[in-house]
Amino acid sequence: MSADYITMTIPKQKRIALIAHDAKKEELIKWCEDNRNILSRHELCGTGTTARMITDRTNLQVKGYNSGPLGGDQQIGAKIVEGRIDFVVFFSDPLTAAPHDPDVKALLRIAQVYDIPMANNKATADFMIQSKLMDEPYDHKVINFQKNIDNRANTLGK
């Protein structure tokens, strides 16, 4: 039987998702401007409006997915599952209700399940981006999902 956990590697060049609720977009754009030199060395993506605004205002190339309420948060979550996003910066607004709150919670959950670094405010993002780990590969352990599936299939198939 295989191990309960497998080692995954976040590469030196990170694939970073940039997301912000409407009330936090300006703050994230400013943060991207302030950290442009670091961010320019990584592959960037984000939800629709946020990605477009960052690209327009900072000249950083940010691949855009759908807007959060139109499935963008779920698209980012799917990319985490596929191993195509290593790092998430999501400036969320805790004081405003969002119609897509279940999608946001699902994104937070999947980042936690896959042990993906995630900042939900500027202070955390500052600490993460200034970490020595930003410029080197990072090995981390995640649940061995294939073992989990095999165990469930064997248990439920009886």
Image: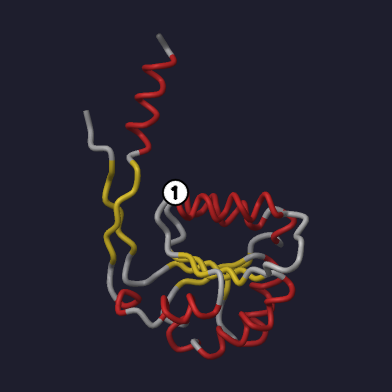
Residue occupying the far top of the picture: 158
Residue 30 is situated, as x and y percent measured from the top left of the image, at 61, 87
Q: Quadrant of the C terminus?
A: top left
* Residue located at (41% from left, 20% from top): 153
Q: Secondary structure at mark 1?
A: helix
Residue 18 is situated, as x and y percent measured from the top left of the image, at 57, 70
Left or right, 52 with respect to 6, comes to right
* Residue located at (76% from left, 61% from top): 97
How many circles with numbers are drawn on the protein?
1
* Residue located at (61% from left, 52% from top): 105
Q: How is the rendered protein coloured?
A: secondary structure
Mark 1: give few (<14), some (14-19) or many (20+) Cα within 10 Å: few
* Residue located at (53% from left, 50% from top): 109
Q: Quadrant of residue 131?
A: bottom left
Q: Quadrant of the N terminus?
A: top left
Residue 69 is situated, as x and y percent measured from the top left of the image, at 74, 57
Residue occupying the far front of the picture: 95
Question: Which amino acid type corresponds to the residue marked 1 in the rendered image?
Answer: Val
| Vertical relation: 74 (above or below) 91 | above
Q: Which residue is mark 1?
A: 113
Residue 60 is situated, as x and y percent measured from the top left of the image, at 56, 82
Left or right, 45 with respect to 2, comes to right
Q: Quadrant of residue 62?
A: bottom right
Front residue of 73 and 95? 95
| Vertical relation: 115 (above or below) 49 | above
